[in-house]
Amino acid sequence: MKHLKRFNERGTNEMLEDIRDICQELKDDGFYINIFQLDNYILIKLDNYILISKRLFTNHGSYLGNFDYKDVSEVIERLKDYLGDRFLKIEAQIPAEAVVDSQFTHSQCVDITHYGVDKILKNGNFTDIKGVRIYYKY
């Protein structure tokens, strides 16, 4: 498997292919994987991230579907291992009512980096998420 090499041992194009390879099983299960490499802008320094989401289709178009974090947790752990020291954080987009003391009425992104996978999987707030972002530095 190509992704056994760490991120910093690979070139940019190879790295993108490795990320796609790592995420392939999620794509096979109907997830969308978008890789945003945004730190090449001259005036604005933006973070690079991988967005995992699930899109559902109807006769009237498509919309973001909800999913359980456990459906993507193994792949996220492999991405963290692959990115190594370049890994920054993980954010999950969860409903506002799931966030304690939330002042928002819509879903919001919550940094879940330091929760630990076991704690996240036991926490009922992460069974109805709309997306996960894995931030990394290049």
Image (cartoon, rainbow, N blue to C red):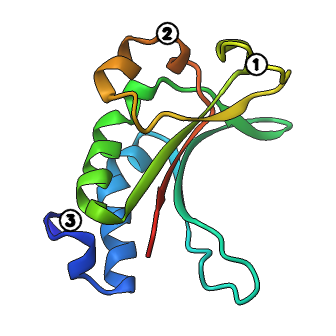
Determine the residue positioned at 34% across, 76% down.
15
Mark 2: few/some/many CA within 10 Å (<14, 14-19, 20+): few
Determine the residue positioned at 45% across, 69% down.
137
Question: Identity of the amino acid at label 3?
Answer: His
Instruction: For mark 1, give the secondary structure.
Output: loop
Asked which quadrant contains residue 86, the reply is bottom left
Instruction: For mark 2, give the secondary structure.
Output: helix
Give me the C-alpha separation between circle 3 and circle 1: 38 Å
Above or below for 125 versus 36: above
User: In the image, which is nearer the foreground, mark 3 or mark 1?
Assistant: 1
Q: Nearer the viewer, residue 116 or 27?
A: 116
Instruction: For mark 3, give the secondary structure.
Output: helix
Tell whether 55 sits left or right of 35: right
Residues at marks 3 and 2 touching, judged by CB atoms closer than 8 Å: no
Among the two numbered marks 2 and 1 on one chain, the one whose residue lies closer to the N terminus: 1
Q: Would you name the residue on which mark 1 appears?
A: 102
**Which of the numbered marks, if any, corresponds to residue 124?**
2
**Which of the numbered marks, if any, corresponds to residue 57?**
none
The quadrant of the rendering that contains the C terminus is: bottom left
* Rendered location of residue 69, percent (x, y): 44, 27
Determine the residue positioned at 20% across, 65% down.
3
Q: Nearer the viewer, residue 51 or 98?
A: 98
Give me the C-alpha separation between circle 3 and circle 2: 31 Å
Question: Identity of the amino acid at label 2?
Answer: Gly
Q: Would you name the residue on which mark 3 appears?
A: 3
Determine the residue positioned at 31% across, 87% down.
11
Question: Identity of the amino acid at label 1?
Answer: Ser
User: In the image, which is nearer the foreground, mark 2 or mark 1?
Assistant: 1
Above or below for 27 versus 69: below
